[in-house]
């Protein structure tokens, strides 16, 4: 490996959208314990990147209305330059991660952060986050709520849309 290669730190920001309510209400509503309703973002190159109903967005770390993350996971380092990363995000924003492709259970912020984490570091995000949709949908109440929840597009306010928003 070249000694002059620049390395960039990569973090996973984890937010509980339920602000702790999932922990107390999930046993009653779903019959199983959920510790949170997770929103995640990748922090690299001095910015926070996330996917929602508006597409791929960025902001300063902790700069959405969600405030500071509940948990920060160090994913490692990357040698991918910021220029290559931004080209990669732009490509994703024009195809796979357009705003109109957002689906709460199948194609969400956590799907995005998992893919980006693998691109940058070769590591996945924790499975308790990626497994959450199947955990919810495996319950009778989750199946009843699915039609309502499928119509929800989460886009934390405070980010700058990278790819021009809801491309159709």
Image: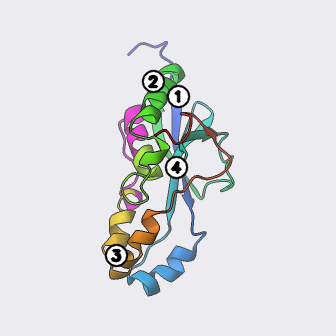
Mark found first going from the N terminus, 2 or 3 = 2
Give how far apart the Cα atoms at labels 4 and 1 are: 25 Å
Q: Residue furthest bottom?
A: 28
Q: Quadrant of the N terminus?
A: top left
| Magenta span | 114-129
Instruction: Report the mark closest to the observer, 3 or 1.
Output: 3
Q: Are marks 2 and 1 in contact (CB under 8 Å)?
A: yes
Residue ID for mark 3: 143
Q: Is residue 65 above or below residue 33?
A: above
Residue ID for mark 4: 52
Q: Is residue 89 above or below residue 48?
A: above
Q: Nearer the viewer, residue 69 or 143?
A: 143
Residue ID for mark 1: 8
Dot 3: element: helix
Give how far apart the Cα atoms at labels 4 and 3 are: 22 Å
Q: Is residue 34 above or below residue 105?
A: below
- Residue 61 horizontal side relative to residue 140, left or right: right
Give how far apart the Cα atoms at labels 4 and 2 are: 24 Å
Q: Is residue 84 above or below residue 164?
A: above
Dot 4: element: strand
Mark found first going from the N terminus, 4 or 3 = 4
- Which quadrant of the figure has residue 116? top left
Residue ID for mark 2: 80
Q: Nearer the viewer, residue 71 or 84?
A: 84
The residue positioned 45% from the left and 71% from the top of the image is: 148
Give how far apart the Cα atoms at labels 2 and 3 are: 41 Å
Q: Are marks 2 and 3 in contact (CB under 8 Å)?
A: no
């Amino acid at each position: 490996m070249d000694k002059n290669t620049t390395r960039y730190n990569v973090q996973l920001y984890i937010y509980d959208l339920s602000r702790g309510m999932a922990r107390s209400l999930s046993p009653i509503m779903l019959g199983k314990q959920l510790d949170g309703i997770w929103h995640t973002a990748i922090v690299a190159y001095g910015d926070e990147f996330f996917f929602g109903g508006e597409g791929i967005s960025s902001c300063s770390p902790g700069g959405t209305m969600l405030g500071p993350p509940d948990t920060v996971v160090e994913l490692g380092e990357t040698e991918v330059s910021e220029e290559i990363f931004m080209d990669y995000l732009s490509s994703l924003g024009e195809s796979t991660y357009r705003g109109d492709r957002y689906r709460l259970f199948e194609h969400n912020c956590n799907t995005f952060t998992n893919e980006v984490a693998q691109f940058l570091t070769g590591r996945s995000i924790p499975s308790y986050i990626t497994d959450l949709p199947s955990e919810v949908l495996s319950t009778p109440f989750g199946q009843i709520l699915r039609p309502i929840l499928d119509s929800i597009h989460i886009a934390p306010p405070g980010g700058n849309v990278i790819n021009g928003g809801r491309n159709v």
